[in-house]
Amino acid sequence: MATQPNVLHYINGRFVESANGAFFDNINPFTNEPINQVAEGNKEDIDAAVWAAKDTFDGGPWRTMPVEERLRYVLRIAELIERYKEEIAYLEALDTGIPISQAKKQAARAAENFRFYAEMVKTRLVGEAYHVNGQFLNYTVYKPVGVAGLITPWNTPFMLETWKVAPALATGNTVVLKPAEWSPLTANKLAEIIDEAGLPAGVFNVVHGFGETAGAALVAHPDVRLISFTGETTTGMEIIRNSAATLKKTSMELGGKSPLIVFADADMERALDAAVWGVFSLNGERCTANSRLLLEQSIYDEFVERLKQRVDQIVIGDPMNPATELGPLIHRAHWERVNRYIEIAKQEGADVYAARVPEGLEKGNFVPPTLLLGCHNRMKVAQEEIFGPVMAVMAFADEQEAIRLANDVKYGLAAYVWTNDMKRGHRVAQAIESGMAWVNSPNVRDLRIPFGGTKYSGIGREGGHYSFDFYTEVQVVHVAVGDPPIPSFGKTKPSSALSVEQK
Ligand code: NAD
């Protein structure tokens, strides 16, 4: 039985059905029953949304209004997110299975994203000026790019959507958002909030639907000037290929298989806290999850014993229960994929240790917190992103081996190093091929720092002022302030126009 009203697209300031009237079912991961139906967008719906966004960008007030006025709208969105934070957290937990206590933190972060970019645009979106020999002034201006196509995944969907929407809007672009098909509820709530904030029609648009149809149409559209994408590496590759024909800017935030390295001299209790939280919070569906745990040989047995105790104590249950620490995975298909990897781990010879899912939760997509012990780095489960509450655990002999194992993977998103030898902490963190590294810390992130990965984990950085590189075009204006000489060209006609040879 449906528990929520159906979700429609938000195009040109109106909530509308698809041009062909199609809908798809949105499923509750806790019960596997329908939550509601969602408008299934296609090329016609993308065309309508891009047309509205382009028309508003070219002729509308958003790009040209005083920046203070535009930023007041952005702040208003932040205020409304705060006002509706309980509802947003509820919808997110319902749609994705993320425990409600964790969904609340994500909603708070989403409001921060808008506040932060309102401030950043006011204080940090600044150009440069060069005085050249007293003859020229060269200066730079930052302009919005145009229609921004934003394509987002289903893990922490609301926070990740706002992470892109906030800088895109604050810098003056107009937006077409294509949220993930498995988590449409909070994208719809964002549309309602932006509608209530009173942004001009066409500035922000949402088209729901599948990647291969709605997403691909957005990527191919000639009037979309940039695509900011967060999702799987293989999807990112496809999007880069498909956006080449219209030469779009692309930003790629992709998958990860991030190592957490614990040296024998580390604060073991804190390293344990960080390792457990980093891979089992958000149901393990976190791009920066420490899904590979590298333990120095001398502490391997003790650390693993304590890990097992922690795993056994994780509270598995209804995502709406405030005490729940681990909820169901987003979708049955993803549940099957994660379970397949656990089977592969057994075939590859890993010693699989898993907690028990309590009785009564059979209808949900539950995978218990799972340790793949005694892994080696050549195993598929040590190399591929599983994206669930599953951690591959292996031992290393010394610092060199730890670095070699950490880097021997195609991904390079995050890394975590635990040691009380600070020289080694810096050295190892810098030796790891990752966009981000933390030393003696779980994954905490100040909004000012660049976010992104290397290798197969992404291209480009967003966050802080780094988002300006992507969401704006820099233009340089050269102005002569003196009378610099201009090369004489065709000014005086020579006595004979014929060259020596021609004569
Ligand atoms: P996904 O790649 O399957 O889908 C992401 C989005 O792309 C969805 O909206 C989908 O509809 C759309 N899409 C799919 N095919 C498309 C196509 N051909 N053209 C255009 N759009 C298309 O990813 P997912 O399963 O939703 O998300 C999980 C993945 O996201 C994991 O790999 C995770 O690591 C990654 N992720 C990365 C970051 C990061 O910042 N690096 C953050 C969160 C998630």
Image: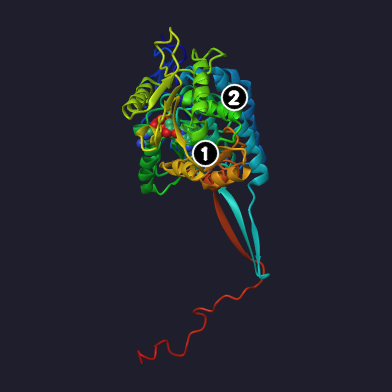
Q: Is residue 326 above or below residue 416?
A: above
Query: Where does the image place residue 1, in percent across and percent down from the top left?
Result: 41, 9
Q: Count of labels shown?
A: 2
Label of residue 352 in the image? none
Marked residue nearer the N-terminal end (2 or 1): 2
Name the amino acid type tagged 1.
Ala
Q: Quadrant of the C terminus?
A: bottom left
Q: Quadrant of residue 120?
A: top right
Q: Residues within 10 Å of mark 2 (few under 14, many from 20)?
A: few
Name the amino acid type tagged 2.
Lys
Asked if residue 94 shows in the view, the reply is yes
Residue at 37% x, 29% y is 210
**Secondary structure under the numbered disc 1 in the rendered image:** strand
Query: Where does the image place residue 55, in percent across and percent down from the top left?
Result: 48, 40
Label of residue 105 in the image? 2
Query: Where does the image place residue 416, in percent across and percent down from the top left?
Result: 54, 37
Residue at 66% x, 71% y is 133
Q: Which residue is mark 1?
A: 415
